[in-house]
Amino acid sequence: MPRIKVIGGGLSGCEASLQLADAGLDVDLWEMRPQVTTPAHKTGDLAELVCSNSFKGLGLTSAHGLFKEELRLMGSRLISLAMESRVPAGESLAIDRAMFSAAVEKAIATHPRITLHREEAAGLDPEELTLVASGPLSSDRLTQSLFTLIGSQRLYFFDSIAPVVEYDSLDLEHTFAKNRWEKGTEPDFINCPLDKETYFAFVDALVAADTVEAKPFEKGQLFEGCLPVEEMARRGRETLRYGPMRPIGLRHPVTGKTPFAVIQLRAENRQRTLYNLVGFQTRLKWGTQKQIFSMVPALKDAAYARLGAMHRNTFLNSPQVMEPSLRIRNTRIFCAGQLTGAEGYTEAIGTGMYASSMILAHLRGDEGFTWPEASCLGALTRHLTDPNPDFQPMNFNFGLLPKVETASKKDKKGVQIENCLKALEGFRPFPERVPVMT
């Protein structure tokens, strides 16, 4: 029975390791932290969430809700652990980071078929069966080995992290608790309203603020799906009011009026002692962040458990180098997670599940194995590997699913959801104790 080498103890690597081990294979999981650190991680914990504690929506009518339902139906280990670590966030899946990481650590540590190596895996052998799930912050040595192997130039985009504020430091007189459109049985968000004058002063300060200076080769490489708040402000004074500061569906419970703009805070942990500034990823200098955010009445004297930061993320030009199975052409090396250009937590877990199912199919000689075309993972991985001269990282969305020609525009999404769930009926990507070829 072959041993599988998995590089990277993030979401995709841990999901894949558990799936492969559950299928009866022995797994060597390599995680370089804490011996080798990254610019964004704070701990050496497995499956540490860096940017946000939100896995986005749960409802089936949202793309991420449908995606999570697919992963749940297919037996995702990490989606199950995330649900067990959930904190209140309306119709979204937000989790307690520490609780989630601890649960993943326990699942890995107690699995008899997984051996965890706390050291850097720097080299790649194209003949060794390997899953590279090292993420967008792979070590320099591993990244160099990977790009030497594929003969491609590096590609970059830049990701940023939102601040986290301490609850006890908020001025609650200038807040109100409410979910957008009053969804849910109890409010999960703290809202910080801004009047017109304060909003425009806040935006003008963002536009004029000092940011961490990007190196020459970094400029112009921001990822559209995770723009720093100051970059959004520079696109127009009203941009934030139609983005992360939109007040729609948030009438004040006392005045009955809708604020001119609002900053939403979402719980970071179950104790609700820490709150994330939703959508406020930033690369502002730390002192500048404190100064500008203090303009918001509720945040005047706020204490921050973490300030925003920015880091470089690396991803492969997947359509050029990978087969539909997420295997690098002419090798026995598979890839998963953000390294493939699949942006987002659910996508990282999903591609870890997908790649592990493809490794199992490869071992049993079933090279024709595919996920259903109408499934979320089938659609996402097609985007990652189909020819694309202008490839960019992307979250899963309904636009990736097969077109529905017969449905009206109004009913299109419902038909896509129905087609996805129907395609998954009877589909089993992980046959138990599959016979494998060595």
Image: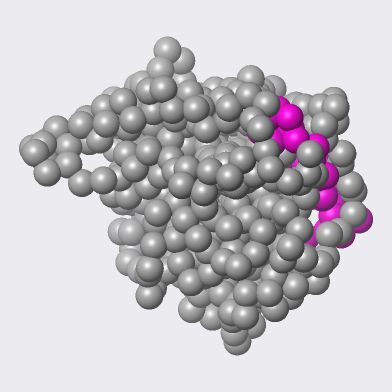
Q: Is residue 370 left or right of residue 420?
A: right
The image shows residue 420 at horizontal and vertical percentages of: 32, 32
**Residue 218 image offset from top left, x and y in percent:** 58, 79
Q: Quadrant of residue 437?
A: top right
Q: Which residue shows up at 38% across the image and 73% down it?
A: 390
Identity of the residue drawn at 42% across and 12% down = 185
Give the camera-side residue of 280 and 428. 428
Is 150 inside the magenta-drawn segment? no
The one nearer the camera, 221 or 30, is 30
Residue stretch in magenta = 19-48
Q: Residue at x 82, y 27 (%)?
A: 111
Q: Is residue 156 above or below residue 169?
A: below
Residue 43 appears at what percent x and percent y? 82, 46
Q: Is residue 386 visible?
A: yes
Instruction: Return the x and y of residue 386 as percentages of the image width and height.
Output: 39, 62
Name the residue located 59 percent from the left edge and 64 percent from the top edge: 328
Q: Magenta part mainly helix, strand or loop?
A: loop
- Please determine whether, in this image, residue 211 is positioned above or below residue 262: below
